[in-house]
Amino acid sequence: MSIKQRLESIMSTLPEGVSLVAVSKFHPTEHILEAYNAGQRIFGESRPQEMAAKAEALPKDIVWTMIGHLQTNKVKLIAPFVSLIASVDSDRLAAEIEKQAAKCERIIDILLEVHVADEETKSGWDIAELREFIASGALEAMPHVRVRGLMTIATNTDDEAIIRRDFQNIKSIFDELKPTFGEQFDTLSIGMSDDYPIALEYGSTMVRIGTAIFGARVY
């Protein structure tokens, strides 16, 4: 199947109101253009330099989403154009995004990444630390950062019960925090190529799909 066919196949499974981030990291610009020409506009990258180079080379109406762990010293590379930073996992990173967004005179949308998986290697806030950070009022002093919701990556396992537990946990946290942020807090980014159908059952509004669209990555 072509990228266009795979993309159309996935889109046909998504309910109204669920957005698709086509995870294009490590894929060449030709692949992104093929998806773009099939109507896709939101693309996800995990390396700031790669994202900046692609943004320079590709159509300007692409909506770029940063989905990987982001080092504070790399924020400046994407701050002028990135639409969403979906992997904000520390107060230091949030503060740096505020600083760089202010320099660019922009408001940058972010998702707070929460750690719910069994693997220690996955990044994200511990929920107790996140509650403390939100309660501190630090975000209220960041006018150039807009918290749109939460993101997580479920445990990498074939055990569906564990995946469901992870998605149930993040949905509960999302529901708990929503009153704090109000209407702008509308994005729950859960679900990837292997588990997105389950994520949809737990209220996902944004799925991140790479392999199922572009095939195996070219490293």
Image (cartoon, rainbow, N blue to C red):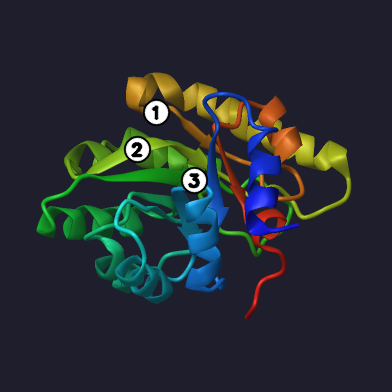
**Picture quadrant where residue 58 is located:** bottom left
* Viewer can see residue 79: yes
What's the residue at 63%, 38% (across, down)?
11
What's the residue at 77%, 41% (across, down)?
163
Viewer-side residue, 59 vs 20? 59
Q: Residues within 10 Å of mark 2 (few under 14, many from 20)?
A: many
- Along the horizontal axis of the image, is 136 left or right of 8? left
Q: Which residue is mark 2?
A: 147
Q: Residue furthest bottom?
A: 219
- Relative image position of residue 166 (x, y in whole percent): 71, 39
Amino acid tagged 1: Phe
Q: Residues within 10 Å of mark 1 (few under 14, many from 20)?
A: some
Q: Which residue is mark 1?
A: 185
What's the residue at 24%, 68% (across, down)?
76
First of labels 1, 2 by sequence position: 2
Amino acid tagged 3: Gly
Q: Quadrant of the C terminus?
A: bottom right
Q: Quadrant of the N terminus?
A: bottom right
Q: Which mark is residue 39?
A: 3
Amino acid tagged 2: Val
First of labels 3, 2 by sequence position: 3
- Relative image position of residue 148 (x, y in whole percent): 38, 35
Compute the Cα span from label 3 to label 2: 27 Å
Q: Residues within 10 Å of mark 3 (few under 14, many from 20)?
A: few
- Along the horizontal axis of the image, is 211 left or right of 87? right
Do the residues under discs 1 and 2 have CB atoms within 8 angstroms? Answer: yes
First of labels 1, 3 by sequence position: 3
Viewer-side residue, 56 vs 85? 56
- Relative image position of residue 216 (x, y in whole percent): 72, 69
- Along the horizontal axis of the image, is 42 left or right of 158? left
